[in-house]
Amino acid sequence: MVCGKCANPSGSLKCSRCKIMTYCNRECQVAHWPEHKIRCKKFEMSPEKLRLQFFVGDKEILFLEDIPALLCQPNAPRELTSRWVSNLVDTHTEKVLEQHPGRCVYCSKQAMALKTTPMVTLNSKPPTILVLARHLCANNRSSPCAVKLEEELQRGFNSPDFPKGGELYRH
Ligand SMILES: [Zn+2]
Ligand SMILES: [Zn+2]
Ligand SMILES: [Zn+2]
């Protein structure tokens, strides 16, 4: 999860009030507080469960999750939704990879990572995140296989066949 202060990817300390912002450590949290306190509050949960659906190869894995009601509003603050969505997807990606190990889609080595592309429609009923996930040999964005996949995804996003109605989250 990404730190809200310094953008370091190792942020595993979660703000205990809003449960949305994440930080490397207490120092980053304290440093970010003057800015974060404007938005931070204990969020009321939506009565509807979020459908978080992963597609890995020919497998579909569904998680039903609680979601703050605020994030299901059409005008929800994007900085909160995008952080919340990427943290939630990251948290589940490891479980999905553990349960569905596979081989890199390009070089066939044992996959060490899943490249995820969430399609997000939080203001639908039920709120939904579809995650297209592909097996990759390395978690490193600059590895040759990751670069190839990024190029392929880029072409996919520009293709007219790509599903409409959702918002794509790139991260
Ligand atoms: Zn907070
Ligand atoms: Zn930090
Ligand atoms: Zn590979």
Image: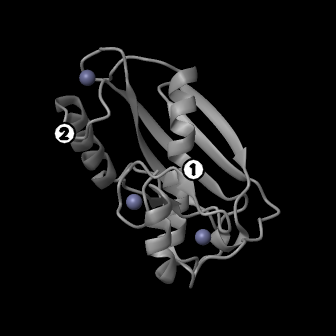
Residue 17 vertical placement versus 132 (above, below): below
Residue 150, x across and y down, in percent: 25, 42
Name the kind of residue labelled 1 in the image: Leu
Residue drawn at x 61%, y 41% is: 53
Q: Are marks 2 and 1 in contact (CB under 8 Å)?
A: no
Q: Is residue 15 visible?
A: yes
> Does the beta carbon of the residue at mark 2 sit less than 8 Å from ligand 3?
no
Residue 171 vertical placement versus 17 (above, below): above
Residue drawn at x 31%, y 46% is: 156
Disc 1 packing (10 Å; few <14; some 14–19; many ≥20): some
Residue drawn at x 43%, y 73% is: 31
Marks 2 and 1, how far apart at CA: 24 Å
Name the quadrant containing residue 13. bottom right
- Camera-nearest residue between 158 and 52: 52
Name the kind of residue labelled 2 in the image: Ser
Task: From the viewer's perspective, tell me whether residue 45 is left or right of residue 81.
Answer: right
Q: Which mark is residue 142?
A: 2
- Camera-nearest residue between 78 and 159: 78
User: Quick check: which quadrant has ligand 2?
Assistant: bottom left
- Camera-nearest residue between 158 and 36: 36
Residue 69 vertical placement versus 146 (above, below): below
Q: Which mark is residue 88?
A: 1
Task: From the viewer's perspective, tell me whether residue 115 is left or right of residue 72.
Answer: left
Residue 110, x across and y down, in percent: 36, 15
Disc 2 packing (10 Å; few <14; some 14–19; many ≥20): few
